[in-house]
Image: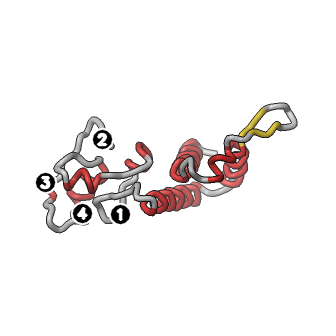
Amino acid sequence: MNRLGTFLSIVAISVFLAACGSDNKQAQDANQTTTTTTGNKKTRTEEKLEVQQEEIRFLSPNEKITKAKALLEEAKAELAQKGKYSCCIKETCNSCAFEHQNCGCYTSLKAGKPVCNDCYAGWQRGDGVDKDIKKEQVKTSYTGHKH
């Protein structure tokens, strides 16, 4: 398996699992451990990830990227339903999902604060969601974005 495919698969699964939140029954069950035949202890989440990684191993690079994108979009949709993803561009940003597992860029933008680099780039392309805000008003912090 190439490194990019493995990385994208692990990142997408990690983002998805982080987005589920600790209040989820599955997340609570993940803390329970089982003992393998070799005596190693694994959580249910670790076991599930191993199965998913084995299934992903046989996908083509394009299929892996498509699957990673789908998982990321699913995680962002779940976060939005929980009120944790309020993005300010038409195609929601990815950097906030990876870095913070939430997005408050729209709130930050309306308060005159910097947005993430993805959102900044989206505004400069003309993809902003608020017609009352001009792209020249949007700012970002290239060294880091905080929520």
Q: Report how far apart the C-alphas of labels 1 and 3 lie in the structure.
A: 19 Å
Give the residue at mark 1: 91
Q: Residues within 10 Å of mark 2 (few under 14, many from 20)?
A: some
Q: Earlier in the sequence, mark 1 or mark 3?
A: 1
Percent position of residue 18, x then y: 53, 47
Type of the residue with mark 1: Glu
Question: At x 79% / y 32%, what residue is drawn?
Answer: 40
Quadrant for the C terminus in the image: top left
Q: Residues within 10 Å of mark 1 (few under 14, many from 20)?
A: some
Q: Earlier in the sequence, mark 3 or mark 4?
A: 4
| Most foreground residue, 37 or 146 | 146
Question: At x 29% / y 61%, what residue is drawn?
Answer: 89
Give the residue at mark 4: 128
Q: Report how far apart the C-alphas of labels 4 and 1 lie in the structure.
A: 9 Å
Farthest residue, direction front: 23
Q: Secondary structure at mark 4?
A: loop
Type of the residue with mark 4: Gly
Residue 18 left/right relative to 51: left
Give the numbered dot on residue 145. Answer: 2
Q: Earlier in the sequence, mark 1 or mark 2?
A: 1
Percent position of residue 71, x then y: 54, 58
Q: Residues within 10 Å of mark 3 (few under 14, many from 20)?
A: few
Q: Say whether marks 3 and 4 touch (CB < 8 Å).
A: no
Q: Say whether marks 1 and 2 touch (CB < 8 Å).
A: no
Q: Secondary structure at mark 1?
A: loop
Give the residue at mark 3: 137
Type of the residue with mark 3: Gln
Q: Report how far apart the C-alphas of labels 3 and 4 lie in the structure.
A: 11 Å
Q: Secondary structure at mark 2?
A: loop
Q: Residues within 10 Å of mark 4 (few under 14, many from 20)?
A: many
